[in-house]
């Protein structure tokens, strides 16, 4: 990774929120969640250990802002050494019958508790509370399409436009299009809508699982979807 000198070109944001406010809110939220993360680490950690005896945390290298790789933190929800299985469009499989997911992991995923350790990433500046979902740092930057690269101009997020409004119900090109919509319309108002919609989506368990999807013949990422009028 280190020898990939070509980073994503980033245009300096112009609004006060994009330049200063968003990061200030990220740090405030992350600090507020630290006591909860400590308590969850004790309880969830014990449950994971009792379930299969494996490690509590899962760390994986992802692409971050400007195309810089970083390690993401999550509570482990899959069996140790589980293979990486993908849909036809290269998106992650999220199936109710996925045998790779542990008993405790199913609960963690359904409630999104497995994502809470990512507040450590928010605190250290590699992630934001709101932003595109970070991809695995396996595909070289020079092989990425325009939409795939443009989403790297902002910090990746714990939740985002896709997770809030669609979760696992869309294809990978559709997710990239939505991510680019977010990049182009980044604002406090949009971030607040995403936070409230994420809470609603998690509480209702909407679109937690996805079925295997075929990649569309032609990417729709050049046409970012309009923000939902009401949800």
Image (cartoon, rainbow, N blue to C red):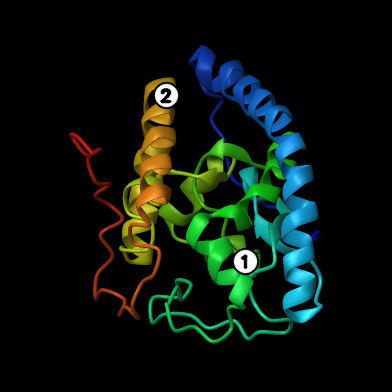
Residues 213 and 183: in front is 213
The disc at residue 140 is 1
What x and y, as percent, mark residue 203? 40, 48
Nearest to the eye among marks 1 and 2: give it: 2
Q: Secondary structure at mark 1?
A: loop
Q: Under tag 2, what secondary structure? A: loop
Residue 47, given in percent of the width and then of the height, sits at 73, 67
Residue 191's image quarter?
top left
Q: Is residue 103 above or below residue 24?
A: below
In front: 141, or 199?
A: 199
Q: On the rendered image, what quadrant is the N terminus found in?
A: bottom right
What residue is drawn where x is 50% and y is 52%? 149
**Label 2, on which residue?**
187
The residue drawn where x is 64% and y is 76% is 78
Measured as percent of width and height from the top left, residue 186 is found at: 42, 29
Depth check, front residue: 209 or 46:
46
Q: Is residue 159 visible?
A: yes
| Left or right for 68, reference 229 | right
Q: Residues within 10 Å of mark 1 (few under 14, many from 20)?
A: few
Locate the C terminus and report the quarter of the image it occupies: top left
Sequence-first disc among 1 and 2 = 1
């Amino acid at each position: 990774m280190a020898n990939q000198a070509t980073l994503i070109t980033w245009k300096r944001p112009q609004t006060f929120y994009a330049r200063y406010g968003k990061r200030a809110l990220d740090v405030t939220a992350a600090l507020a969640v630290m006591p909860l993360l400590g308590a969850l680490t004790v309880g969830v950690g014990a449950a994971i250990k009792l379930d299969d005896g494996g490690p509590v945390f899962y760390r994986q290298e992802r692409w971050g802002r400007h195309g810089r790789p970083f390690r993401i933190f999550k509570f482990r929800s899959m069996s140790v050494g589980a293979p990486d299985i993908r849909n036809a469009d290269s998106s992650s499989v999220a199936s109710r019958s996925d045998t790779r997911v542990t008993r405790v992991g199913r609960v963690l995923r359904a409630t999104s508790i497995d994502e809470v350790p990512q507040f450590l990433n928010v605190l250290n500046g590699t992630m934001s509370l709101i932003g595109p979902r970070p991809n695995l740092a396996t595909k070289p930057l020079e092989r990425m399409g325009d939409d795939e690269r443009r989403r790297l101009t902002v910090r990746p997020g714990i939740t985002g436009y896709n997770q809030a409004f669609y979760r696992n119900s869309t294809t990978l090109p559709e997710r990239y299009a939505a991510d680019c919509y977010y990049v182009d319309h980044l604002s406090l108002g949009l971030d607040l809508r995403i936070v409230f919609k994420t809470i609603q989506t998690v509480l209702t368990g909407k679109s937690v699982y996805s079925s295997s999807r075929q990649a569309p013949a032609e990417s729709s990422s050049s046409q970012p979807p309009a923000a939902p009028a009401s949800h």
